[in-house]
Amino acid sequence: DTQLPGDLTRVLYSKEEVAARMRELAAQIDEDYADQDLLLVGVLNGAVMVMADLSRALRIHCRMDWMAVSSYGSGTQSSGVVRILKDLSTDITGVHVLVVEDIIDTGLTLSYLISNLRSRNPASLKVMTAFRKPEAAQNAVEVAYVGFDIPNEFVVGYGLDYDGHYRNLTSVGTLSPHVYS
Ligand code: PRP
Ligand code: MN
Ligand code: MG
């Protein structure tokens, strides 16, 4: 099933394509973290869908925690200002941490998060993202697991929002410019 409301111009990835890719990444993560105590850190709000799918596709034990940060406000451009709206509930000292993101666009959110989390001395710190845009390459943030590299268009669905909307679309598509221009 592919939802395509009038505000989307094109579906980039269907529900099925996204699900299949998340299962592939989960299998890789299963291998890489076998016998390790893994903490998935979901970045609210966008990562809720990825977290729900990835965590349930894993066969290894894992725990989940959440951080809420925001850099976008209500525009379509990253402001570059990252605010922590909610911090982790757990101490990650000595813990294997995998940050779970829906998308890396400029990479600003992630580079802030990584340096913040690294200062807490986790056993290891890696990143998984469902989607990544080209600009992310300019920020030297290493991403261990990438679902899809996508073109530099404004996309919504599967957790990705425009002003809070469209997160619950099961597919991922490009937002028609008439919505935000
Ligand atoms: C979005 C997205 C990432 C971040 C990526 O979050 O979920 O967290 O922007 O952008 P960047 O690489 O340019 O920093 P947003 O700040 O919109 O908050 P949200 O997850 O609540 O939508
Ligand atoms: Mn986010
Ligand atoms: Mg957002």
Image: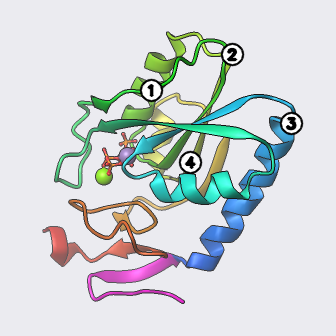
Residue 125, position in %: x, y?
63, 24
To which residue does mark 2 refer?
123
- The residue depicted at 42 percent of the width and 74 percent of the height is 173
- The residue depicted at 69 percent of the width and 64 percent of the height is 21
* Magenta-tinted stretch: 1-12
Q: Which quadrant of the structure image shows residue 107?
A: top left
Amino acid under label 1? Ser
Report the mark closest to the observer, 3 or 1: 1
Cα distance, mark 3 to mark 2?
Answer: 15 Å
Residue 159, position in %: x, y?
42, 60
On screen, residue 131 versus residue 106, left or right, reads right
**Reading the chain from its start, which is encountered first: label 3 or label 2?**
3
SS class, disc 4: strand
Cα distance, mark 4 to mark 1?
Answer: 22 Å
Residue 129's tag is 4
SS class, disc 1: loop
Cα distance, mark 2 to mark 1?
Answer: 17 Å
Amino acid under label 4? Thr
On screen, residue 42 versus residue 46, left or right, reads right
**Reading the chain from its start, which is encountered first: label 4 or label 3?**
3
Report the mark closest to the observer, 4 or 2: 2
Cα distance, mark 3 to mark 1?
Answer: 24 Å
Q: Is residue 2 magenta?
A: yes
**Reading the chain from its start, which is encountered first: label 4 or label 1?**
1
**Circle 1: is it few (<14), some (14-19), or many (20+) Cα within 10 Å?**
few
To which residue does mark 3 refer?
34
